[in-house]
Image (spheres, helix red, strand yellow):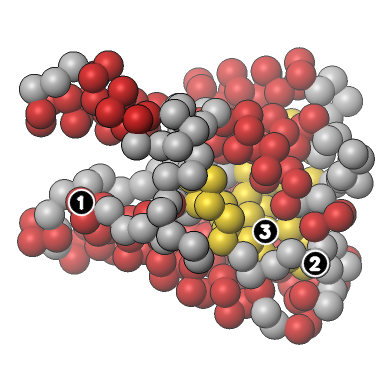
Amino acid sequence: MDFGLSGRWALVCAASKGLGLGCAQALAGEGVNLVITARGEADLLAAAAALRAQAPGVEVRAVAGDITTPEGRAAALAACPQVDILVNNAGGPPPGDFRDWDRAQWIAALDANMLTPIALIKATVDGMAERGFGRIVNITSGAVKAPIDVLGLSNGARSGLTGFVAGLARQARLASANVTLNNLLPGAFDTDRLRKTLAAGAANSGASVDEVAARRRAAIPARRFGTAAEFGAICAMLCSEQAGYLTGQNLLLDGGAYPGTF
């Protein structure tokens, strides 16, 4: 199916690796020009080179910087002629006990996982509406539906973003202008973050990383971890012309791990 995206521009955050890169790869495959951001310049430039090789007809611009800062956002936005597609993404805050977190740690979590996406939405959504097309996809977490006790910082910040997006997506001036806002909620995907989590679990339990990973996979009905490529494919589908009637939704990608009906 042709998603009708060829020639459009996308800003994809945290796209040097993992799920952000998977989204960038899928969009490039649909002929979307890209501005990709990340803090690590070497990994970002390598990702940009790989994307150009994958899709020779696509323009790829790499902007290294911290998207959680006003300067980082300004540089990324300035590199994009127009933002037709915005993929918000940021690494989650560290696990721990809420009793140990001070105000600064809460503010850092909110900046990365709630306030930065909102700032980028604010900077782009009205232009999308004026042009009659816009797709905003926020990569959040399966913990929004099934909170994990040690991820309180992430639970709080990402849930705040989810509530904000739910209200904004239903504004008639956006929905009627073919502008959609949706959230993708990843479960366990084979990324650096998951590998770090498995390593931490192994260190705490005394088991090997392989043993911890096997237990984690056994709790997933699909009996495997997700891949960045399949995550990116769903992101591209949400950004398609055909997805214009889908807005304000939270799509959980977890191999069936969430046990609820809703």
Query: Which mark is in front, 3 or 1?
Result: 1
Question: Disc 1 marks which amino acid?
Answer: Val
Mark 2 neighbour density, 10 Å: few (under 14) some (14–19) many (20 or more): few
State whether residue 77 appears in this view. Answer: no
Q: Residue at x 73, y 43 (%)?
A: 236
Nearest the eye: 45 or 16: 16
* Circle 1 crowding by C-alpha within 10 Å: few under 14, some 14–19, many from 20: few
Can you tell which quarter of the image residue 25 is in?
top right
Image position of 59 with respect to 55: above or below: below
Q: Estimate the spatial distance between the alpha carbons at disc 2 and disc 3, rounded to whole Å.
A: 13 Å
The secondary element bearing badge 3 is classed as strand
Question: In percent of the image, x 81 and y 50: which residue is there?
Answer: 240
The residue positioned 69% from the left and 37% from the top of the image is 233
Q: Where is residue 154 in the image (x, y as percent from the top left)?
A: 33, 56
Q: Where is residue 45 in the image (x, y as percent from the top left)?
A: 59, 23
Q: Position of residue 81 (x, y in %)?
A: 80, 49
Q: Is label 2 or label 3 in front?
A: 2
Q: Which of marks 3 and 1 is nearer the N terminus?
A: 3
Q: Residue at x 56, y 71 (%)?
A: 165
Question: Which disc, if any, is residue 136?
Answer: 3
Between the C-alphas of marks 3 and 1, the distance is: 29 Å
Where residue 212 sits: x, y (%)? 24, 25
Q: Which residue lies furthest to the bottom in this view?
A: 172
Residue 171 seen from this side = yes
Kindly check if marks 2 and 3 are in contact, taking CB atoms under 8 A apart as contact: no
The label shown at residue 150 is 1
> What numbered label is drawn on residue 245?
2
> How many other residues sit within 10 Å of disc 3, few (<14), some (14-19) or many (≥20)?
many
Could you tell me if the residues under marks 3 and 1 are in contact, i.e. CB atoms within 8 Å? Answer: no
Viewer-side residue, 239 vs 56: 239
